Image (cartoon, rainbow, N blue to C red):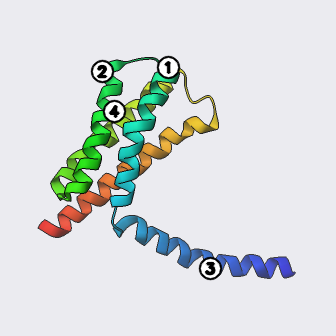
Amino acid sequence: MQYGIRLGYSKKKLKPMLKKLSHIFKYSDSQPTEITLGAALMVLAPIATATEIGFMPFYQLTLVAAGFYQLYCVSKGKLDCRIRAAIITFGLFSTSLIMYVLTIGLPSASHYGWIILVISSFSNLRRLKTEQLHRHG
């Protein structure tokens, strides 16, 4: 009986918490996420793709340049630049995921991180576009 009461209590707490997280996810400032995505694109993605898929100098150099551009745009603070960088970041994370799926697949749980990066980069892009629409009508 006591377990059921606790479960009911947690359900009451869970709904407002999920609503708050949804609000934060949709409307909060995305700069920390942009910095994290840019750093991952610049440092981790080239190492991971070179190690697991193979050395592709043009692609890995593109990842580094795009990650740097993402960080540059965040530091510059211009919304249009941040949106362009978010489009590039989303495209490159999506491309990396597709390359993984088509070559080695997603053989371990850690490889599912690519899905998280694609979702996060898309959510970041959507958030920035929403901000742009609210600013410019």
Report crowding for label 4: few under 14, some 14 to 19, many 20 or more residues within 10 A (C-alpha).
many
Local secondary structure at mark 1? helix
In the image, taking residue 43 as reference, residue 108 lies left or right, namely right
Q: Which residue is mark 1?
A: 103
> Compared with residue 8, is residue 75 higher up or lower down, i.e. above or below?
above
Q: Which residue is mark 3?
A: 13
Q: CA distance from mark 1 to mark 2?
A: 18 Å
Image quarter in which the N terminus is found = bottom right
Disc 4, disc 3: CB below 8 Å? no
Residue appearing at x 33%, y 32% in the figure: 63
Q: Which residue is mark 2?
A: 58
Q: CA distance from mark 3 to mark 2?
A: 50 Å
Residue appearing at x 41%, y 37% in the figure: 43
Q: CA distance from mark 3 to mark 1?
A: 44 Å
> Compared with residue 57, is residue 64 higher up or lower down, i.e. above or below?
below
Local secondary structure at mark 4? helix
In the image, taking residue 53 as reference, residue 73 lies left or right, namely left
Residue appearing at x 62%, y 28% in the figure: 107
N-terminal of the pair, mark 1 or mark 4, is: 4
Q: Amino acid at mark 1?
A: Thr
